Amino acid sequence: MRFFTAILPPPAVADEVAAVVRDRLTPLPGADRLRWTARDGWHVTLAYYGEVPRERLAEVRERLAAVARAAGPFALRLAGGESLGEHALGTGVAGDRAALTALAAATADAYAHTDRRYPTYRPHLTLALAPRATADGDERVALAPYVAALRALAGSPWDVAELALMRTADEPGVASGVASGDAADAAPSARRYTTAASWPLTG
């Protein structure tokens, strides 16, 4: 099983993002070729663990509980947009970035690998994945117009008060693209996320 730690936006914040996706992003050319992430899987990743052996899960949970006890609540909001390379489109994250980065580092340390190196932390909420260029001539969807449209996103702040351990699994045969013109309720990507455990930030 693959795991990562994350922050989950509250429903009201997700509503704001869904409205921007529906009104500003899905009308753009090429939107039907993007693989839109399912709203019920929206999250801001803290640290990605990859495969975690079942026998180590109890240890990881204990360490994350300790991280949550040491970290206090802090304010964030989703604002603007960015592309992560040429493949992923996401929102930006504003607010107490120092507290967010510290929490990300602490959760990364909770499941340390001697052979693992974490890249520079770049918080975001992924909205869509662009298909790669194909041999038969299909070009990649340019994400720049989507990033520009997301500049108008200025989400409401919320107090981050919970740390989540997420589990990810691939579901074969799930459709991609926009189902009914509303990306927030679109057919999800084949990757599904569930909350394996969560802890309040009480530090």
Image: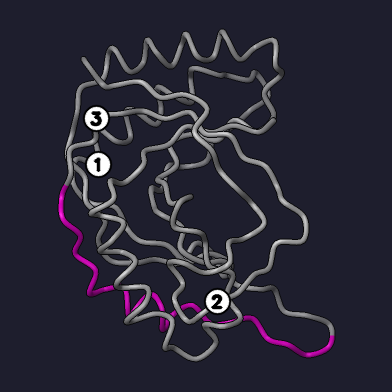
| Precedes in sequence: disc 1 or disc 2 | 1
Can you identify the residue that label 2 sits on? Answer: 178
Q: Secondary structure at mark 2?
A: loop
- Mark 3 belongs to which amino acid? Ala
Neighbours of disc 3 within 10 Å: few (<14), some (14-19), many (20+) = some
Front: mark 1 or 3: 3
For label 3, the residue is 161
Q: Is residue 137 left or right of residue 150?
A: right
Q: Nearer the viewer, mark 1 or mark 2?
A: 2
Span highlighted in magenta in the image: 136-157
> Residue lying farthest right?
135
Tell me, yes or no, whether the highlighted magenta stretch contains residue 166.
Answer: no
- State which tag comes first along the sequence, 1 or 3: 1
Instruction: Give the label, 3 or 2, closer to the camera.
Output: 2
> Mark 1 belongs to which amino acid?
Arg
Kindly identify the residue that appears in the image at 30 percent across and 73 percent down.
20
For residue 87, which quarter of the picture?
bottom right
The Cα–Cα distance between marks 1 and 2, rounded to whole angstroms, is 32 Å
Q: Is residue 128 left or right of residue 157?
A: right
Pointer 1 local density, CA inside 10 Å: few below 14, some 14–19, many at least 20 = some
